Image (cartoon, helix red, strand yellow):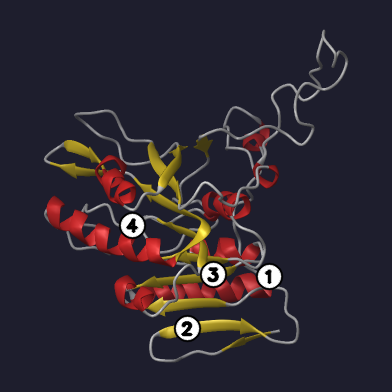
Amino acid sequence: MHKNLIKNSCIFELNHTNGADIPDSVLACQENIEFMRHLPDAKFKLIVTSPPYNLGKSYENKMLLDDYLVAQEQVINECVRLLHPQGSICWQVGNCVENGEIIPLDTILYPVFVSHKLKLRNRIIWHFGHGLHCRRRLSGRYETINWWTKTNNYTWHLDPIRVPSKYPNKRHFKGPNIGKLSGNPNGKNPSDVWTFPNVKSNHPEKTVHPCQFPVELVERLVLSMTNEGDYVFDPYMGVGSTIVAALKHNRHGYGCDIIPQYVEIAQQRVRALISGTLKTRPMDKPIYDPSLPNGGH
């Protein structure tokens, strides 16, 4: 049974008693710099987030690009301090748009991460099928997840995120392994291009947040880059998708956001997860295909 310790100022804690099988979580309605300031060095095995893109959305104040970069650098500096030596930072961003010109945010943030001697392991492309339709350029249908590690000795598990092989029964036809399976029987490496839906109106996870993280995106990172019992943190928590993904897989989840409504929704989602009523899109669910019966589901 979980005990809800609400409410200590603007920090919300959910911790377990009586041997519950879901780890503790901390959700804060607080500026991320202030929240991180009180956390110990090297606590988190995974820091994953999607910061505002400086587009003037309802949850952000649009800034001059130079000011935006300074603000991001301050947050990244603290994240590096909090990162475990075997940990990973996954920074998921799209494009800032200035007078019709796109500015890829991961490219302008690259020097900030490099200045901390972090190592870029992958630039993951997340492709989705729906979004705003552009009139004078091609419609954007992808964002990037830049995966950085602090050292070469980082936590990594491929097996939990393998995907079905294209030819699962393919075998070697010559050489010393003739007749044996040529691929891993548990599936193949999913590659650095991920295709699954973003959270729109018909998505089972949809809340009031206009740019919500899909839980399945974070699950892949949690499963491959952490161990059970590790700590996961999101400095731009939004409605708590990172926390949900961490708790689903027996990791501790920490997060903060400055918008009280989002933090309240995040709490509600964690409670629903604990009670077994939270709906999330399964990681292995195929993309809906209208040409197939029941969309392929």
Badge 2: how crowded within 10 Å, few (<14), some, or many (20+)? many
Q: Secondary structure at mark 1?
A: loop
Which residue sits furthest right? 179
| First along the sequence among labels 3 and 4 | 4
Q: CA distance from mark 1 to mark 4?
A: 29 Å
| Quadrant holding the N terminus | bottom right
Q: Are the residues flagged by discs 2 and 4 in contact, CB closer than 8 Å?
A: no
| First along the sequence among labels 1 and 4 | 4
1 or 88, nearer to the observer: 88
Tell me where residue 75 sits by quadrant. bottom left
Q: Are the residues flagged by discs 2 and 3 in contact, CB closer than 8 Å?
A: no
| First along the sequence among labels 1 and 2 | 2
| Residue holding disc 4 | 51
Question: Which label lies toward us, 1 or 4?
Answer: 4
Which residue is drawn at the image coordinates 22% and 61% (left, top)? Answer: 71
Q: Are the residues flagged by discs 3 and 4 in contact, CB closer than 8 Å?
A: no
Tell me where residue 61 sits by quadrant. bottom left
Q: Are the residues flagged by discs 1 and 3 in contact, CB closer than 8 Å?
A: no
| First along the sequence among labels 2 and 4 | 2
Question: Which label lies toward us, 1 or 2?
Answer: 2
| First along the sequence among labels 2 and 3 | 2
| Residue holding disc 3 | 253
The kind of residue tagged 2 is Phe
Q: Secondary structure at mark 4?
A: loop
